[in-house]
Image (cartoon, grey):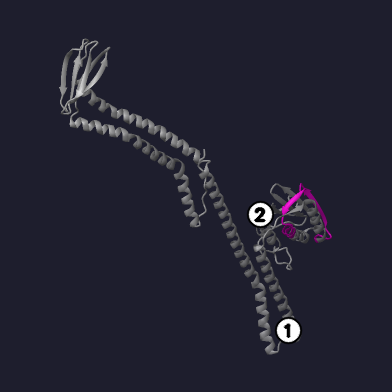
């Protein structure tokens, strides 16, 4: 029930309750008023009018009331007078007869009570309806508004303090419930953004740590060779050939440092890169992947298996191809004779799996393969250990993930999942 419909029902119920309370209060106040009337009715004097007779009443010169009763022949049979302020003459009917009722005036106390009761009866109507409206507003606030509003206020305060570790659940399917759902969507989005930012910060911290660690080796080598040259050249103990050899070693390590710096720049650019998804023909993209696999894995048997990637893929083709080329380069380095690529598309995801028939990943590599600058003991020294780290970064930027494993029949398996 919407808030508007609920409010209308609350008002209607409050009006019915106010009407019932008003009728009950009027009836309750009527009892003492009727009791006062009956009290003076019992003190009244009754003057019978003969059958066929008549009566006449009039106001006297001093403001009182007087009466004359006539019989059927028109003769006066009875008369009387009530002085001003001592009573009034009323005509009564009962049991087929007519009579005059000489009712005494109310005392000051009874007159005050009677008038007060009348005022209270009149005032009970606005009091009951105003009370009903106030009760309606309080109940509507307590039952329909207070809970969601207080919950949203608390949530706003926690978000302002960067505390996103909570969930909001709508209490009812009304306007405030939908507002709560929107607020929860915003909170979840903020939480996801914070998690991604924290993950990026952690990734950069690990990257910087790995970079600093890998810089120590070439720097140590450069320092050692520089010390040797500084000692041997002034002493004249180093020949030109030895000095040239030392400088060649130093030059190679300087080139290695340059490669590390360039790699760091590429990784930073990847972290900040934007993913631009576009509609890509699945069959044409699979053909491009097959061509790249044949070129990169030259000298090896390559095969492409497509499991449902027909129609259109909604991906960043350049980023996906960069990931696949890095994975294929790793597979070509370790494969003995064969590399297999499997492409699969499901609602919301595109998955590429590359399997080789090499030795597979070691236990350490399974845990650290995607770390920056990680190189296993069996890997050569010509690469920096950034291939799978680049793949991991791009898949995460694309709303997916990277997984490494070993096939039960031998060989490494790398699976890249991309969100569509």
Q: What is the C-alpha distance between the residues marked 2 and 1?
A: 53 Å
In this picture, is 288 found above or below 212? Answer: above
Q: Nearer the viewer, mark 2 or mark 1?
A: 2
Residue 51 point in image, percent of width and height? 24, 10
Residue displayed at 69% across by 73% down? 258
Q: Is residue 34 magenta?
A: no
Q: Residues within 10 Å of mark 2 (few under 14, many from 20)?
A: some
Residue pictured at 74% horizontal, 86% vertical: 239
Q: Which residue is the site of mark 2?
A: 399
Direction from residue 48 to residue 389 in the image, left or right: right
304 magenta-colored? yes
Asked whether, in this view, residue 273 is left or right of residue 303, the answer is left
Q: Is residue 43 visible?
A: no
Residue 222: which quarter of the image? bottom right
Residue 166 visible here: yes
Which image quadrant is residue 100 in? top left
| Residue picked out by circle 1 | 243
Give the percent coordinates (x, y) of residue 294. Answer: 82, 58
Q: Which is nearer the eye, 272 or 354?
A: 272
Q: In this image, 160 relative to 86: left or right? A: right
17 shown above or below 295:
above
């Amino acid at each position: 029930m919407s808030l508007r419909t609920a409010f209308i029902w609350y008002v209607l119920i409050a009006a019915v309750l106010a009407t019932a309370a008003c009728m009950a209060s009027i009836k309750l106040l009527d009892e003492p008023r009727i009791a006062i009337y009956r009290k003076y009715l019992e003190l009244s004097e009754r003057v019978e009018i003969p059958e066929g007779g008549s009566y006449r009443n009039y106001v006297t010169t001093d403001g009182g009331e007087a009466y004359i009763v006539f019989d059927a022949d028109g003769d006066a049979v009875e008369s009387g007078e009530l002085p001003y302020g001592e009573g009034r003459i009323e005509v009564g009917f009962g049991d087929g007869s007519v009579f005059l009722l000489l009712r005494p005036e109310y005392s000051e106390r009874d007159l005050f009570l009677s008038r007060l009761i009348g005022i209270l009866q009149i005032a009970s109507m606005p009091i009951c309806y105003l009370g009903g409206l106030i009760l309606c507003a309080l109940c509507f606030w307590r039952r329909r508004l207070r809970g969601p509003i207080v919950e949203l206020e608390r949530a706003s305060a926690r978000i302002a303090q960067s505390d996103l570790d909570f969930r909001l659940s709508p209490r009812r399917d009304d306007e405030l419930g939908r507002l709560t759902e929107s607020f929860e969507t915003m909170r979840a989005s903020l939480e996801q953004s914070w998690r991604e930012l924290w993950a990026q910060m952690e990734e950069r911290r690990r990257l910087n740590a790995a970079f600093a660690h890998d810089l120590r080796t070439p720097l140590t080598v450069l320092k050692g060779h520089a010390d040797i040259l500084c000692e041997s050249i002034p002493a004249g103990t180093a020949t030109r050939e030895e000095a040239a050899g030392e400088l060649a070693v130093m030059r190679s390590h300087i080139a290695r440092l340059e490669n590390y710096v360039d790699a760091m720049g590429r990784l930073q650019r990847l972290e900040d890169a934007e993913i631009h998804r576009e509609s890509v023909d699945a069959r044409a993209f699979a053909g491009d992947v097959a061509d790249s696999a044949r070129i990169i894995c030259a000298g090896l048997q390559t095969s492409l298996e497509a499991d449902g990637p027909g129609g259109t893929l909604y991906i960043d083709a350049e980023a996906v191809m960069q990931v696949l080329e890095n994975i294929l380069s790793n597979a070509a380095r370790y494969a003995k004779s064969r590399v297999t690529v499997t492409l699969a598309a499901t609602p919301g995801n595109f998955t590429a799996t590359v399997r080789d028939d090499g030795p597979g990943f070691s236990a350490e590599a399974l845990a650290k393969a995607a770390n920056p600058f990680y190189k296993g003991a069996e890997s050569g020294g010509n690469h920096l250990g950034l291939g799978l780290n680049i793949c991991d970064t791009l898949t995460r930027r694309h709303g997916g993930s990277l997984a490494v494993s070993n096939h039960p029949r031998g060989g490494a398996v790398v699976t890249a999942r991309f969100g569509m």
